[in-house]
Image: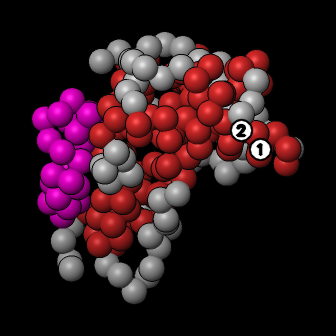
Amino acid sequence: MSSDAVFDVTGEPSESSAALGETPRNRRQEETFRKVLTAGLEMLRETSYGDLTVRAVAARAKVAPATAYTYFSSKNHLIAEIYLDLLKQVPFFTDVNEPMPTRVEQALRSMALTVADDPEVAAACTTVLLAGADPTVRRVRDRIGGEIHRRIRSAVGPDADPRVVSALEMTFFGALVNAGSGVFTYHQIADRLSYVVGLIAGDDR
């Protein structure tokens, strides 16, 4: 795996779109962006990474190919954005009535299972996120890393030890590699993460 494929999660990511490398969009642009994104996800569920093309997705979304390329410079860029969008739908676990290890376990499990039931989507996302040096894809990978960091950081709590957060992040990224390579299923990975959380964050449940 290339070192370029490592998520950038150093520091405390900003919440602003500009700081995360995301191009601001007006309402109409956002509607078009999401239309193409949704069409891409639907096609990935029906086909495979190798068969997917931006032109085919554009046709399904009923937009011109040039319009689709305005938002997604390549197939890999589109797939990376699909994974980022799925990850953004994972909730934050911050209930102070729950023990910290429980919150962390819930966060990691939810993120790990994002594509668990969509094998073609999972395979495509793994291919894109772990390979290539496309600068556009790298920027999306960094935003993905930011989303993961925020969810782990929030689950650990406001007084989180940066070393614990870093260890949990590296554990999660390693788990994704194992699941993406087929060594374990995503459901198996989610179960194993629960065990590792107990080792890193303690187990006072």
Name the foreground residue: 70 vs 153: 70
User: Is residue 176 placed above or below 186 in the rendered structure?
Assistant: above
Q: Is residue 184 visible?
A: yes
- Measuring from the top left, give residue 78's x and y in whole percent: 57, 29
Name the foreground residue: 165 vs 137: 137
- Measuring from the top left, give residue 192's x and y in whole percent: 15, 54
Judged left or right of residue 131, residue 201 is: left
Label 1: few (<14), some (14–19) or many (≥20) C-alpha neighbours in 10 Å: few
**Type of amino acid under label 2:** Phe
**Judging from the image, what secondary structure is the residue with disc 2 in?**
helix
* Distance between the alpha carbons at the discs numbered 2 and 1: 5 Å
User: Is residue 141 placed above or below 194 in the rendered structure?
Assistant: above
**Judging from the image, what secondary structure is the residue with disc 1 in?**
helix
Judged left or right of residue 22, residue 179 is: left
Residue lying at 49% horizontally and 35% vertically, measured from the top left: 43
Q: Is residue 179 magenta?
A: yes
Residue lying at 66% horizontally and 47% vertically, measured from the top left: 14
Q: Name the image quarter holding residue 120.
A: top left
User: Is residue 161 placed above or below 122 in the rendered structure?
Assistant: below
Q: Looking at the figure, which quarter contains the C terminus?
A: bottom left
- The residue that label 1 is drawn on is 30
Q: Residue furthest bottom?
A: 97
Residue lying at 29% horizontally and 72% vertically, measured from the top left: 102
Magenta segment boundaries in residue numbering:
173-200
Name the foreground residue: 62 vs 165: 62
- The residue that label 2 is drawn on is 33
Asked if the residue under mark 1 is in contact with the one under mark 2, i.e. CB atoms within 8 Å, the reply is: yes
Residue lying at 44% horizontally and 70% vertically, measured from the top left: 93
Q: Looking at the figure, which quarter contains the N terminus?
A: top left
**Type of amino acid under label 1:** Glu
